[in-house]
Amino acid sequence: MSQGNKYVTIAEQAVQKAKSKGAAMAEAYVLSSKELSIDVRDGQVETMKLAEDRGLGLRVITDGRVGFAFTTEFSDDGLDSVVQQALANGANTEPDKFYTLPQVTRQYTQLDIYDPTIRSATVEEKIKMAMEMENTAKSYDKRVKIIESSSYQDAELEVSIVNSQGLSAHYQGAYCGIYLSLVAGEGEDSQTGFALKYGLKFADLNPALIGKQAAERAVRMLGAKPVATQKAAVVLDPYIATNFLGLLAPALSGEAVQKGRSLFAGKMGQQVASDLITIVDDGRLPGGIASAPFDGEGVPTSETVLIEGGRLKGFLHNTYTAAKEGINSTGNGVRGSFKSTPEVGTTNFFIRPGRTSAEQIIKDVKKGLYVTEVMGMHTANPISGDFSLGAAGIWIENGELTKPVRGVAIAGNIMELLSAVDAVGNNLEFFGGKGAPTIRVSSMSLSGS
């Protein structure tokens, strides 16, 4: 049974108290969440954690000054206290005329984001999933030596938001997922492999498939060696393409552009990538793990095309960054919890799939590297777009995957990489809230032996 109305009422009380104490505008955001995680090792439950959290974040705006405070105490005294704290915090901030709260006139989209099976499935069924992944991986190949992590996770959340502009909204959501990482070994050589699946539907989790994928990925890398330094085509598997996409996420926020920290600043309307590349953020995507009817400010989520056919079309905004530009928020005021204010962030962020199969993309390569792993992505510079990464994968010769490769480096700039894309697969795959299909880059420098 949803607590929604109860939480909306508490949020309304907080807003009324803030108004009565002198706030020109007020917003209360209530989040209640429950997370379960199960880790299995050698057929035994190693850890099981159930965490619950609930609280209220209050924003007040008076004369362009913003005050914020949060509480986990929903009593009358607790609400009085958080109002007092938010007002006191606001008195010490610099005024900024662009701070405002949204007025929402549009209807929220009805989304299928709560699967009751996630809650009704027993803990035993969830443990069984983690064990099945482990067993499938071990029986796939005797060279699978160590299961590092075989995990099941799920979370439920309820979000309620009320502001003094007449906004009052609530939703309930849930997601679940499984993750496996392991090590395969032969002689002195050992290689890692992993696979995961996160989504909104319990019935979509397939532990046998995840077990097989992780084992396959580790085993196929046994015996990997460097190749000679050369220029060659590079095919990025969906996980690696998603990693590169993650590097672009901060640069496509209106906040980064306004602060001069985006490599896309001043490039609106320009060609910034191959015409095969379209990048989208869609907070209403059916089945998307980050889908919700509204963002952390109560603004309806939307589909925002950021790069279309390689051309820069727009940026992501919350109410504040949109006000600075004189435009509407894109519904990307994202909140990590009730303890923070809405920052600009992505929802379901992805490269739109093309029409070519991944198999065909590889088949058309005379000589190149199919990249399945990169090391050091955190060292890439999100402002300049420069990167230098260790890479591993499978060598492609005359359209065939031939031998495993490790110990090579790929370096370049994300803008150059995007511009050199000459094929985009039809196999869009999501890893949490970000996703990409297989992508081929016509030529890159590989530093090897």
Image: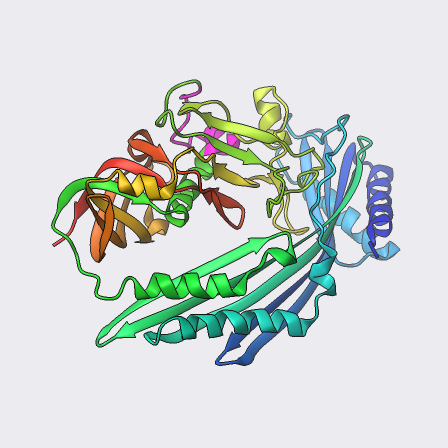
Residue 372 at x, y percent in the picture: 33, 53
Q: In which quarter of the image is residue 122?
A: bottom right
Residue 428 at x, y percent in the picture: 47, 42
- Taking the spot 64% from the left edge, 58% from the top edge, the residue there is 202
Instruction: Locate the C terminus and report the quarter of the image it occupies.
Output: bottom left
- Taking the spot 29% from the left edge, 62% from the top edge, the residue there is 220
- Taking the spot 56% from the left edge, 29% from the top edge, the residue there is 304
Magenta span includes 265: yes
Q: Left or right? Give the position of 386 relative to 179.
A: left
Q: Is residue 145 above or below residue 434?
A: below
Magenta span includes 439: no
Q: Which of 448 and 258 is in front in this view?
A: 448
Q: Left or right? Give the position of 356 relative to 128.
A: left
**Can see residue 375?**
no
Chief secondary structure of the magenta portion: loop
Q: Nearer the viewer, residue 112 or 26?
A: 112
Q: Nearer the viewer, residue 162 or 121?
A: 121
Residue 241 at x, y percent in the picture: 38, 43
Q: In this view, does 47 lie above or below 177?
A: below
| Region in magenta | 252-268
**Can see residue 310?**
yes
Residue 82 at x, y percent in the picture: 77, 51
Q: Left or right? Give the position of 302 relative to 386.
A: right
- Taking the spot 37% from the left edge, 36% from the top edge, the residue there is 383
